[in-house]
Image: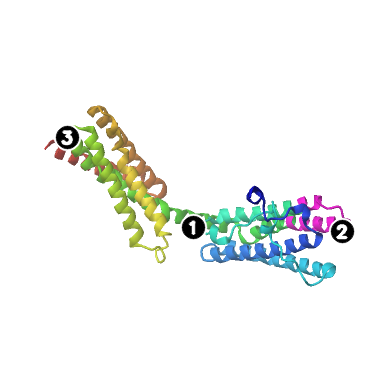
Amino acid sequence: MFRSLFSTPKRRLDSLSEQEVLALAISSEEDDARIYLAYADRLKAQYPASAKVFEDMAEVEHSHRNMLIDMHKRRFGDRIPLIRREHVKGFMERKPDWLQAQLSVDQVREEAESMERSAYNFYVAAQKQVSDTDTRKLLGDLAMAEQGHEDVAQMLGEKHRPEDVQAHEKETARRQFVLTYVQPGLAGLMDGSVSTLAPIFAAAFATGDTWQTFLVGLSASVGAGISMGFTEASHDDGKISGRGSPIKRGLACGIMTALGGLGHALPYLIPHFWTATITAGVIVFFELWAIAFIQNKYMETPFFRAALQVVVGGALVLAAGILIGNG
């Protein structure tokens, strides 16, 4: 029983024959080509230049695959053993492209570079495991071919991604980040920070009880977060507007709404009323200025105009809460 727990069905690298190493290289080239084509399909709509890079890289992988198959036919015949990277212990792993669907364009490029480096490292390691001259030469040639892929990738990048294209792609990625995360998150932060001011401070001045005020703030913040999150996720699926995943937008909006309210609710865990109230007021000040900063940085709203709008609006809501609480 213990042996079955600790044993592995994978083969050791040093147990592979020359034919099996060659078969493994063939299947790896096939897998990498498919991954590159999947990347190209994903990027084609928003990043056509980068998609072309990955299409050309897939072409390179196909050419090496054909060369490896021809070599196998000359040495071992037409029957190629079925062995893949998941069958070999310590072999470089490739995640299925559907598990990488959320990677940014730069992360996809980094993943491709990692694929080429790991393939090179495998062939270098495999070369050290054999003593046969022909096999060592074969593995060395494969290692050099993989190392050359990095140069090809760089060359293709220069060919299809000049500086103006790279700048355009970065701007596209930034715009998508703003639409998916910043815009709904900012709306949530504004709603949570401003709309909860009145009930929290009204409860504080009406009861003078910090614990009861905290419970009011907690319920208002969590309730507003859930409501805003569901509203954001349900009103736009992102397909036409291009604003991205509704789940991501809903989470960003809901979480930031709850945090906006909790920021000035948590100080009422302090038992002393005025200490808690002054602390909450200071936090409100920083919350409102943070909103103005985000509007200026990501929404390109002039800072002083954003600050004036947020501070005046927040002050009016705060005043309303205090007046109601003292009424």
- The rendered magenta stretch, by its main secondary structure, is classed as helix
Examine the image and state in which quarter residue 83 appears.
bottom right
- Residue 88, percent from left and from top: 70, 56
268 falls in the magenta region: no
* Residue type (three-letter) at the residue carrying disc 3: Thr
Quadrant where the C terminus is found in the figure: top left
Q: Which residue: 61% across, 54% down?
A: 111
Which kind of residue does numbered mark 2 sit on?
Answer: Asp
Q: Residue at x 73, y 53 (%)?
A: 12
Mark 3 vs mark 2, CA separation in Å: 88 Å
Q: Which residue is mark 1?
A: 172
The disc at residue 207 is: 3
Q: What is the C-alpha distance between the residues marked 1 and 3?
A: 51 Å
Magenta range? 124-146
Instruction: Confirm whether residue 204 shows in the render.
Output: yes
Circle 3 — which element? helix
State whether residue 204 is above or below residue 85.
above
State yes or no: residue 137 in magenta.
yes
* Badge number at residue 134: 2
* Label number found at residue 287: none
Q: Is residue 45 left or right of residue 192?
A: right
Q: Earlier in the sequence, mark 1 or mark 3?
A: 1
In the image, taking residue 318 as reference, residue 164 lies left or right, namely: right
Task: Specify which label sits upstream in the sequence, 1 or 2.
Answer: 2
The residue carrying pointer 2 sits among few (fewer than 14), some (14 to 19) or many (20 or more) residues within 10 Å by Cα, namely few
